[in-house]
Image (cartoon, rainbow, N blue to C red):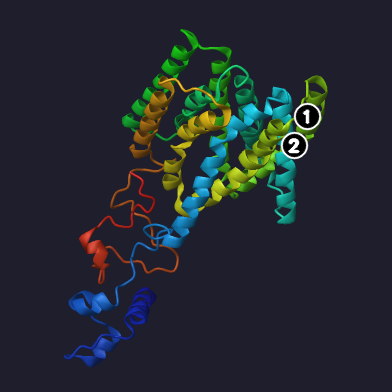
Amino acid sequence: MTGQDSATHDSAIAVSGGPARDRHDPAAARHHPAPSRHDPAAARRHPAPSRRGPAPGGNGPAPSAARTGTLLAALGVAAFSLTFPATAWALTGLGPWSVTACRVVLAALIAGGALAALRVPVPDRRHWPGLLVVAAGVVVGFPLLTTLALQTSTTAHAAVVVGLLPLTTAALSAVRTGVRPSRVFWAAALAGAAVVIAFAVQQSGGAPTTGDLYLFGALLVCAAGYTEGGRLAGHMPGWRVIGWALVGCLPLSVPGAVLALLCEDVHLGGRAVTGLLWLAVGSQFVGLVVWYRGMAAIGVARASQLQLAQPLLTLVWSVLLLDEKLTPAAPIAALAVLVCIGVTQRARVPAAGQAPRTAASAPAPAPGTTHQAPERPDPAPEAVDRKHPTAGANPDNQP
């Protein structure tokens, strides 16, 4: 008996509780237990382990973990949906440059404290160029450009335009990683972009305004930051990516905040302070922490479905907190963008460098699982796999 067959033999004994008995040759039965498929009752009592190897999370997270992860991801989306109303509140007492610089400083102090308390090591030098891209796009670029836009645009208008961010991120990520999404994906992405451009032109009376240009620029820089952050998340937890990006901005954000406060008018009131604190604590740091933890628990595909509600939530906050009056075009455009994003979620987008899955390119068994030679039949496939051969192959329910 080879070492491979011995491992298979030991695994069968461990699962079934002992070797199967053969009434014709007891000795052979001790050395070569009969496959469980010859005894359906035993197979039901002692199902054999899957030969694919355990997929991460099986067919999905455990119910308790799924509930917790869904709740955390939903809290992250709720925190992000309040960013524009909080920015509008902060602008009642601070200038746009002061709002941007002060929120970065406050969030960086919180992130630095968390990194120091947990004794997180400093990232390798090779990761810092990517962290600077995240800092330029997510920490500085997007907050600054959206703050400048909200001086002339309503939060409802900005929410519809920035609702295109998931599509922009997906498109830029496809270019950055070299993947080839399907034609359905690109058709939905272009349709969503057309809806947003038509909405912006209709709202501005025939031509994009300066605020629209700021918002479109914010889409590009934030998508670049998200794309690079997603790449870095393969080397470190996501919250550390944003944490170190914030800390890396401190040498510039501290003098920038001092200079902005000296040059711009400051009339701090309750709304301005509340808005600034929410931007720093809720949107810039805590929201990202709970979002990344929820995404790790339930998977990117499931979490991204929750983010589709963010533009609509922002429209609700703009009415409740800012007393804005929505035009009929705003919710219609938001729903249209949501549909386009939903189509891209269903479209096939292969991972970077991933070839279409075939029988010859099936993944190797995970470490610690037995490997079956091609010429040997599978002695004990799972009962669920006999009925549904593809079950467990797609734990995140991705198309």
* The N terminus - image quarter: bottom left
Position in image of residue 220 (x %, y %): 54, 25
Q: Earlier in the sequence, mark 2 or mark 1?
A: 2
Query: SS class of the residue under badge 1?
Result: helix
Q: Is residue 247 visible?
A: no
Position in image of residue 7 (x %, y %): 38, 76
Closer to the camera in the image, 185 or 380? 185
Q: Which residue is mark 2?
A: 105
Position in image of residue 112 (x %, y %): 73, 46
Image: 13 above or below 342: below
Image: 155 above or below 351: above
* The C terminus - image quarter: top left
- Going by the numbered disc 2, the residue's amino acid type is Val
Query: What residue is rendered at 78% in x and 27% in y?
Result: 256
* Circles 2 and 1 in contact, beta carbons < 8 Å: yes
Closer to the camera in the image, 201 or 313? 313
- Going by the numbered disc 1, the residue's amino acid type is Ala
Position in image of residue 238 (x %, y %): 58, 46
The quadrant where residue 334 appears: top left
Closer to the camera in the image, 23 or 147? 147
Image: 373 above or below 319: below
Cα separation between marks 2 and 1: 8 Å
| Number of residues whose C-alpha sits closer than 10 Å to that of mark 1, classed few (under 14), some (14–19) or many (20 or more) | many
Query: What residue is rendered at 26% in x and 71% in y?
Result: 380
Q: Residue furthest left?
A: 24
Q: Which mark is residue 223?
A: none
The quadrant where residue 186 appears: top left
Query: SS class of the residue under badge 2?
Result: helix
Q: Which residue is mark 1?
A: 257
